[in-house]
Image (spheres, rainbow, N blue to C red):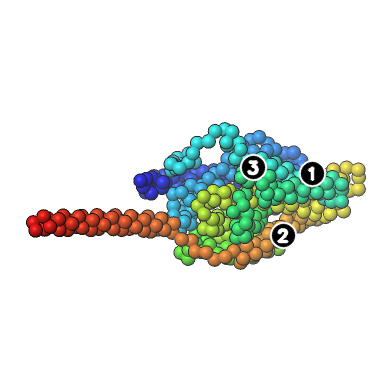
Amino acid sequence: MESSEDKTVTKPNAARLTLIMVGICLAVFLTGMDQTILATAIPVINVEFDTSQNFGWWANAYRHSLIIGRAIAGLVAADVFSGIVLITTKLIPLAQRAAYLVTVVLCGFLIHTPSDPSAQSLSIVQKILQLDIPGTVSLVVSLICLLTALQWGGATYPWSNGRVIALFVVSGILAIAFVATQTTKLAGNARTIPSSLARNRDIWLAGMYAMCITGGVYVAILFLPVWFQDVRGHSPLSSGGLLTPVIAGYVVASILAEGITSGFKYYNPAMIIGTVLSIAGAALLTTINLNSSMARVIGYQLVYGFGVGFGFGQPSYVVQTLLPAEDVPIGVTFITLVQNLSASVFVAAAQSIFQGEMHKRLEPLLPQSSSSSSLLLSTLPTILSSMTAESQALAKSASSDSIIKTFHVSLALSCVSVVGALAIKWVPMQDTAKQDTASSGENAQNQNGMEIEEYKGNEITTESKELSCASDKVEVTK
């Protein structure tokens, strides 16, 4: 009879677990640094190419195959973040994961993943058959059409232009096709979103919450350096330092959130706190202007960073708590997918708002000429060089107001996250290790009980045989 221990994953000792967590911290630090470097470099990239029209593409090239180097980095980052969560689900009990993931926030090569004896090697054909090709194609093309429409609308073409409308229509049709592939048998069993996950209301609410928190913070992180450099005249290095309060608030709040989650064994309190602080921080960011003191700007960033830190990691705990163990990898990947898609879509939407506001506010200030329309697509330094000294001050104020308008996207998303924070049901994060130990103990007790009963039955059978032999001897003596 095969023992239950043969089916369990081997747990690492304390030294190996420490080494694994160090490797995870290094991997997260490198991928996180890559994203923050991009945020402060985008204004310089705009100046290099003398265009502000492609802001959204510079940001989204990290996640989509527009530039080969950025595409490779984006694929690695997606695998790192989702892989880290999956590794912790195998190594650490659910009730303790929040405490261990603090080290991930504070910071792949030294990771030694545990072996799973039940894993089966598949052929290349079997692996291809497991891919959701119809769903993936419809989702990717739908996203490309949506991003292109958001990029063109209000900047290259008016929103009423047939090209923009056609892109929105095609994006919607393909999005419906993606939903159809996930809810019908068109993709067979190889669905991107399994039916068991698709029917779970709380998983969709967790995805919506992750979408709101992630999309909002990416808009703020990418447009704050533009405001620092183009409006306030800071260098890229200085703007990176001025962005630190958001990151610092996120780190500190993440530590506090993991402590609350580990202590109360519920993810809901941290989600509610994160929503409240995110709304407050995003609302404060919408109030800054050209003359705002840096102390105010830093304080507002801290509040918003605290809100994001409290809420960012909680959707993964929802997935790990509510889904069965075999569906947790798909659930974690779903949350990662939603986070990446939301960052791409809402950064493009914010870029569209920024371009529309810039056109509306700067066009009256530009000299009336045939080149004024093309000049509006340039960066702010190029626009200022064509203006008088009096108009330059007005143009800086207009540019500042246009950038601040993008923070309304963060505010709106933070407000929508209230639905996810309040509607997700309260389920305690049970200690899966203790549950496994208890179940194995019950199995052992049942097995021992069966052995005792079998032993007693054998004794009774032996005694009955001895009695029958004794009675036979008595009859022979008579």
Q: Is residue 126 left or right of residue 156?
A: left
- The residue where tag 3 is placed is 132
> What residue lies at 77% left-to-right and 48% top-to-bottom?
173
Find numbered disc 3 in the image and state the secondary structure of the residue it sits on.
loop
Q: Position of residue 415 (x, y in %)?
A: 67, 64
Q: Is residue 354 left or right of residue 460?
A: right
The CA distance from mark 2 to mark 1 is 24 Å
Q: Nearer the viewer, residue 469 or 344?
A: 469
Find numbered disc 1 in the image and state the secondary structure of the residue it sits on.
loop
Give the label, 3 or 1, closer to the camera: 3
Q: Position of residue 142 (x, y in %)?
A: 73, 45
- The residue where tag 1 is placed is 378
> What residue lies at 45% left-to-right and 47% top-to-bottom?
21
Q: Nearer the viewer, residue 419 or 387?
A: 419
Q: Position of residue 169 (x, y in %)?
A: 80, 49
- The residue where tag 2 is placed is 408
Q: Earlier in the sequence, mark 3 or mark 1?
A: 3
The answer to whether one can see residue 48 in this image is: yes
Q: Residues within 10 Å of mark 3 (few under 14, many from 20)?
A: some
Q: Earlier in the sequence, mark 2 or mark 3?
A: 3
Q: Residues within 10 Å of mark 1 (few under 14, many from 20)?
A: some
